[in-house]
Amino acid sequence: MTQEQWGALRKTLCETIGENNYKAWIEPLRYDGLENGVATFGAPTNFVGTYVSQNFGDVMLSQMNALSGDSVRRLHFRVVQGANETSEPTRSAAAVAPATPAAPTSPAVAPAQASSDLLPGAPLDQRFKFDSFVVGKPNELAHAAARRVAEGGRVTFNPLFLHGGVGLGKTHLMHAIAWELRERNPELNVLYLSAEQFMYRFVQALRDRRMMDFKSIFRSVDVLMVDDVQFISGKDSTQEEFFHTFNALVDQNKQVVISADRAPDEIKDLENRIRSRLQSGLVVDLHPTDYELRLGILQTKVEQQMAYNPGVTLQDGVLEFLAHRISTNVRVLEGALTRLFAFASLIGKPVDLGMTQECLTDVLRANERKVSIEEIQRRVAEHYNIRLSDMIGPRRTRAFARPRQVAMYLSKKMTAKSLPEIGRRFGKRDHTTVLHGVNRIEALAKSDAQIAEDLEILRRALEA
């Protein structure tokens, strides 16, 4: 097959597979010739060659043989820099996609150099570094794993997946990893962005017909960090591209760090292959803070507040009161302390318990402990060392049925939800099933010391 025949075939392929597919996948290829029945093509990346072979290979073989009369048995793709520079010179300049940018060498300027509108990552917060992260039992494993990745060497887990509720430190650790990597290894191309930004860049590249730029840029990073990955659930095209980007980086031994508000198997409408990939590394849960950790965070923040408000004094008992009363969200806890210091500075009085209760009335009322069914389910699953999906699933073996009944009992006692609503949260079970479980646990708590102890431990943990 000659170059002229390949030129004619490109037009036929465009009509067969559609203009968008043609521009994204066929146009970047360079035909290098036919030898011993093997047609060789230059491709800008391994990913492009593999994708074309898997999705358009049969069509190309059929049309090549029909047009040239040659016996083309298979296609071979090899990576060639500038492979997409051999496009037809007759095309208008407006239709030519920008050349694939070279991999940037400095992470600090990577977004602007790589592509001013396709790649800018999220800005990093100067406050979110390891030295300002307060470590306690609920987050010590997540902190240790983040530190290990931030050292910049090879790790035994990839990806690192951090998950937990709002205000527990996921984003703080993500920023801290990025800061540390950039300080230790300035030559690394570290990209941090949210899943929403990833989707926006993907859609923008599709719209502007710049998918080759998008793919090349995201596959050239040394460390990819994506925050709040649950945002892409249910978005099929974005998940598809995320999956291929993820695979390409892991196959190249590039580090991937992901965060979400829940574990991979609890994210609805997430493709199974992505869920499996995310679970293949180290999955770490940042647990809700305990009293000691909250108090430690407050003590650290007080030092910062004193620097900004040197004339404000803090009386004994205030920090302990806040650590007890605001237990669900560290951001709210820090915001409450900031408000207290600002108020005290304005009126020129020390921060005492009376001022705290007066100044934070709305915050304290909003943070009165309200236990959710989801939190009860998670706590019970952790306590009995079973998967949450098994506890709320259809399996009826004793190992899952008893924890399920305990969770139903606690949901009835600690929330205002009705029996039908509780049943829906437990795999759409009937309210009579919930009532049976509640009655069963009530009876066992009177005769089984272990069940009674389990209920007390769980109740204390949920009320903490």
Image (cartoon, grey):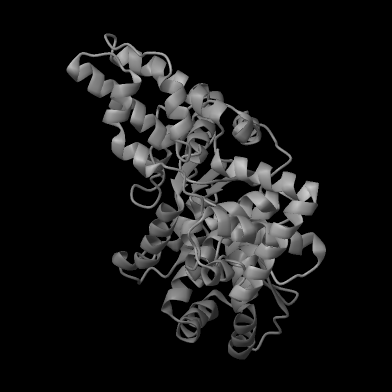
Query: Percent position (x, y) of residue 85?
Result: 46, 60
* Residue 261 appears in the figure: yes
Q: Is residue 330 left or right of residue 363?
A: right
Query: Percent position (x, y) of residue 416?
Result: 48, 59
Q: Kindly identify the residue that appears in the image at 39 percent across and 30 percent down.
A: 334
Residue lying farthest to the left in this orientation: 347
Q: Is residue 126 left or right of residue 263?
A: left
Looking at the rendered structure, the number of numbered marks drawn on it comes to 0
Q: Kindly identify the residue that appears in the image at 73 percent across and 59 percent down.
A: 443
Q: Nearer the viewer, residue 243 or 8?
A: 243
The image shows residue 7, relative to residue 123, as above or below, that is below
The image shows residue 156, relative to residue 215, as above or below, that is above
Q: Is residue 156 left or right of residue 306?
A: right
Query: Percent position (x, y) of residue 401?
Result: 75, 64
Picture quadrant of residue 89: bottom left
The image shows residue 241, relative to residue 6, as above or below, that is above
* Residue 244 appears in the figure: no
Residue lying farthest to the top in this orientation: 311
Query: Percent position (x, y) of residue 402?
Result: 75, 60
The image shows residue 208, relative to residue 111, as above or below, that is below
Q: Nearer the viewer, residue 117 or 130?
A: 130
Q: Nearer the viewer, residue 207 or 265?
A: 265
Q: Kindly identify the residue that appears in the image at 27 percent across and 29 percent down.
A: 358
The image quadrant where one finds the C terminus is top right
The image quadrant where one finds the N terminus is bottom right
Picture quadrant of residue 157: top right
Q: Kindly identify the residue that appears in the image at 48 percent across and 47 percent down.
A: 227
Q: Nearer the viewer, residue 452 or 381?
A: 452
